[in-house]
Image (cartoon, helix red, strand yellow):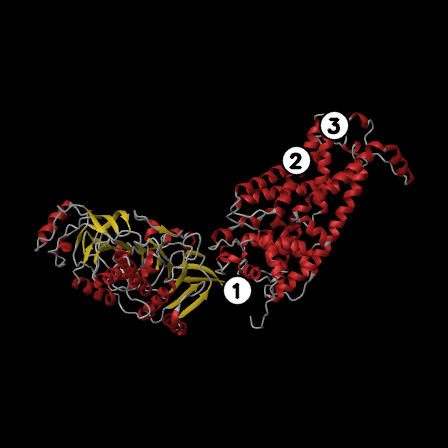
């Protein structure tokens, strides 16, 4: 830490991103007694974790982590949450930042009880991004069933007719279309960027056919299908004809460890596919699952055990060789895939009902860099400059990581931020 | 693999491959995308994934003696999709280059042909040789006539009244030209024959070892039948045309191949005309043989020129090493000097025509004498390997 600077002006800190790691950083700092501004661009906290059916390796639902954090959040007066808000600009230096935050209108105030009457009368429908566009939702919607704040959102795409109808339907006077975009300046001493990740755009992986063939889906799409709150109410079915798949293949490293796409290992996809195998095994005990991989990366005792258990499963097959070519079988919509089994040295041509691409994670900063003095590596991950201090990155803004690792470094970065404020 | 296999890494060989354009070989992490991306890899033991690990481990025997490296036409589809930039196409090209050197005898000459530092010497040999011959032809005609008369052979092949036209024979005796090239071509053929015998046995042994063939023995008669079957594929460039990434390479390559065939025929006819029909050149432009010669010459220049252009344009896609430049510049120069010689002759510029002819002879010398050692040798190795694949039922 530099000591020749003046004492920090602000005693507050900001956390950008309210996913699992942002929640952790905010809570850890606030529970030590510091004021925290938690800025989230979506309408709800929870981030990617809220889209999951289960965490690995324990296979428990994400409510288990989110609920306790929401509880801590509600009990803590030190944290101020800004949803539908984005950082526009960061001025100043470590210890004395002025952050300009733009808050978009939700058109719903604190009176909302999430009763859902508005959604019943609303006729305008929009694509459901939470389910990766696999279904549509009303323009009056609850972000998801673990929303925080537990409040509806009125989408700007809503028709004028519907606006009148939803206002009428709301018994609590919670809907207010006069709300406007707000620009807020906040003074903070330190900022932690927990801006998270986006699934890599699978349409860019030309040889894997996503977007061309209906029955090729991504791992996150499968996750939403498997989730009870998802587009198929938890049923894993193939998109072209809603058929229950009998053979499913996974193409690992779809876009990851590939200098034409993401040059790094995304860390979670191997465990995610193994976890997905458990979903399919539970739903379709006779279905055959084929996992095509380069290397299976399941680090640590718990993950290794998880993998070992699936290896014993007679319906789960592992093929060492990357899927490199796909096509659609005429008429059936089945997917033909080609790989080389590097153990036997033979080309494998397999026809499956559905192919899941284990796409990796791309840091959101690779797509949209915040207007702040940050260092990035070539892939768009934020590189922490501890000597400079003041701003830090945690979770998947910093490196590809699972939930456990994200939370660990989110906690660490809470401490780093506090050190900036205290300057000792 | 049931038997134990103890890898014997040859570090020198790895270094050699890296120098020959396979710099990226260590980047491979064996995902096998390449084997699927390759449009001409067989179903069983496809390439080039297995070649990449063999290269990485320095398993020289498994590469040099592997017929599969010659089935590859370096279209670049594998390198395009490679997630690591390991460029399997370039690595296989380097392996082929090492294989040519390995099978060729004498080794010293093989090494010299692939060493840019030796190029001045390789050029100086024919340059000095032909300068001496030109000197003798122009200044010692009488002496030579006497010497030749001892054997009862006419020294000059020149036309009646040849002193009034430009004929290359006035500059270089046709005897000298043929006394240079017939032995050189014969030597090249002998070197090829010996190399190919070893090569064929090796790739057969390797195919049996790796289970790439259903044949146990090597039946030469059946093999030659396979050669006959493969020739139309080569002439149509069917395999080359299956490639996607470097599609534009197939046409110039085809042009060069056909022009060489054309020029080979022309040379044969010329030999017959000179020694049997006793009718020395230059021949009339209306002569059908001249048409074939001219068309082939033009095709050679255009094909060679396009190859140079493609290589220059796509510097990043495909590694171009000394061995590649050596051969395509040679091919291009061969055609160009030949055509310039002819044009200068038709324009009645004797001195200029003779000068280009001198350069042309040097180019022919470089081609013939170094044929078994240069990249040009791929012609026979690839034909042999493709024929073996046909013979061995490699599907």
Pointer 3 chain: B
- Quadrant location of the N terminus of chain B? bottom right
Residue identifier under label 2: B336
Left-right relation of A413 to B53: left
Residue identifier under label 3: B350
Q: Are marks 3 and 2 in contact (CB under 8 Å)?
A: no
> Label 1's element?
loop
In percent of width and height, residue B112 lies at 69, 49
Q: Is residue A224 visible?
A: no
Q: Return the residue found at the far right.
A: B150
Are dots 3 and 1 on a single chain? no
Q: Residue at x 65, y 56 (%)?
A: B226
Q: Which quarter of the picture shows residue B327?
A: top right
Q: CA distance from mark 3 to mark 1?
A: 63 Å
Report the front residue among A16 and B186.
A16
In percent of width and height, residue A114 lies at 14, 58
Question: Mark 2 or mark 1, which is nearer to you?
Answer: 2
């Amino acid at each position: 830490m530099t000591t020749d600077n003046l004492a920090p002006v602000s005693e507050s800190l900001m956390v950008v991103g309210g996913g699992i790691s942002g929640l952790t950083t905010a809570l850890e700092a606030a529970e030590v007694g510091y004021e925290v501004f938690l800025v989230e661009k979506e309408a709800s906290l929870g981030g990617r974790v809220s889209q999951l059916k289960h965490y690995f390796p324990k296979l428990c639902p994400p409510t288990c982590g989110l609920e306790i954090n929401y509880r801590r959040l509600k009990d803590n007066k030190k944290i101020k949450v800004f949803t539908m808000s984005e950082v526009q600009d960061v001025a100043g230096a470590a210890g004395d930042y002025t952050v300009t935050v733009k808050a978009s209108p939700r058109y719903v105030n604190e009176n909302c009880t999430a009763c859902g009457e508005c959604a019943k009368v609303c006729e305008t429908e929009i694509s459901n991004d939470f389910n990766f566009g696999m279904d549509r939702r009303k323009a009056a919607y609850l972000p998801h069933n673990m929303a925080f704040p537990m409040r509806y959102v009125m989408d700007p795409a809503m028709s004028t007719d519907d606006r009148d109808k939803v206002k009428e339907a709301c018994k609590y006077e919670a809907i207010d279309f006069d709300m406007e975009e707000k620009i807020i300046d906040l003074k903070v001493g330190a900022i932690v960027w927990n801006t998270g990740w986006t699934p890599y755009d699978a349409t860019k992986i030309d040889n894997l056919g996503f977007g061309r063939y209906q029955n090729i889906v991504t791992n996150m799409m499968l996750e939403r299908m498997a989730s009870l709150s998802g587009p198929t109410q938890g049923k894993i079915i193939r998109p072209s004809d809603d058929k229950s798949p009998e053979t499913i293949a996974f193409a690992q490293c779809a876009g990851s460890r590939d200098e034409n796409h993401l040059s790094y290992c995304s860390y979670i996809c191997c465990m995610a596919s193994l976890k997905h195998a458990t979903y399919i095994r539970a739903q379709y005990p006779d279905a055959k699952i084929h996992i095509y991989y380069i290397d299976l990366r399941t680090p640590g005792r718990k993950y290794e055990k998880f993998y070992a258990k699936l290896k014993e499963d007679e319906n789960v097959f592992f093929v060492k060789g990357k899927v490199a070519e796909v096509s659609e079988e005429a008429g059936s919509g089945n997917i033909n895939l080609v790989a080389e089994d590097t153990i036997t040295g033979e080309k494998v041509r397999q026809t499956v009902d559905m192919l899941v691409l284990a796409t990796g994670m791309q840091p959101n900063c690779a797509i949209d860099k915040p207007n702040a003095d940050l260092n990035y590596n070539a892939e768009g991950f934020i590189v922490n400059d501890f000597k400079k201090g003041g701003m830090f990155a945690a979770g998947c803004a910093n490196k590809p990581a699972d939930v456990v690792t994200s939370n660990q470094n989110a906690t660490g970065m809470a401490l780093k931020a506090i050190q900036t404020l205290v300057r000792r | 693999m049931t038997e134990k296999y103890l890898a014997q890494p040859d570090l020198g060989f790895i270094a050699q491959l890296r120098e020959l354009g396979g710099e990226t070989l260590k980047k491979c992490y064996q995902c096998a995308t390449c084997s699927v991306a390759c449009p001409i890899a067989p179903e069983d033991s496809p390439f080039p994934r297995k070649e990449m690990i063999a290269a990485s481990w320095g398993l020289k025997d498994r590469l040099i003696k592997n017929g599969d490296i010659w089935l590859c036409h370096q279209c670049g589809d594998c390198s395009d999709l490679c997630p690591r930039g390991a460029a399997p196409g370039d690595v296989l090209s380097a392996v082929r280059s090492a294989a040519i050197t390995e099978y060729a005898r004498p080794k010293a000459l093989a090494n010299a042909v692939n060493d840019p530092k030796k190029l001045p010497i390789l050029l100086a040999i024919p340059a000095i040789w032909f300068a001496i011959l030109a000197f003798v032809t122009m200044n010692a005609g009488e002496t030579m006539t006497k010497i030749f008369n001892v054997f009862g052979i006419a020294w000059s092949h020149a036309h009646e009244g040849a002193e009034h036209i430009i004929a290359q024979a006035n500059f270089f005796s046709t005897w000298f030209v043929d006394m240079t090239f017939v032995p050189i071509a014969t030597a090249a053929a002998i070197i090829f024959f010996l190399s190919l015998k070893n090569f064929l046995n090796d790739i057969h042994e390797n195919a049996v070892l790796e289970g790439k063939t259903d044949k146990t023995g090597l039946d030469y008669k059946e093999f030659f039948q396979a050669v006959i079957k493969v020739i139309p594929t080569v002439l149509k460039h069917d395999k080359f045309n299956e490639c996607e990434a470097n599609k534009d390479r197939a046409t110039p390559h085809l042009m060069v191949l056909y022009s060489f065939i054309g020029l080979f025929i022309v040379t044969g006819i010329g030999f017959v005309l000179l020694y049997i029909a006793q009718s020395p050149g230059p021949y009339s432009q209306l002569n059908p043989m001249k048409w074939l010669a001219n068309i082939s010459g033009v095709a050679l220049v255009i094909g060679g020129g396009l190859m140079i252009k493609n290589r220059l344009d796509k510097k990043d896609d495909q590694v171009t090493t000394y061995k590649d430049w050596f051969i395509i510049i040679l091919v291009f120069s061969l055609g160009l000097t030949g055509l310039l010689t002819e044009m200068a002759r038709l324009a009645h510029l004797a001195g200029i025509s003779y000068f280009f002819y001198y350069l042309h002879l040097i180019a022919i010398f470089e081609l013939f004498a170094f044929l078994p050692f240069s990249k040009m040798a791929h012609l026979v190795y690839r034909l042999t390997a493709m024929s073996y694949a046909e013979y061995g039922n490699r599907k």
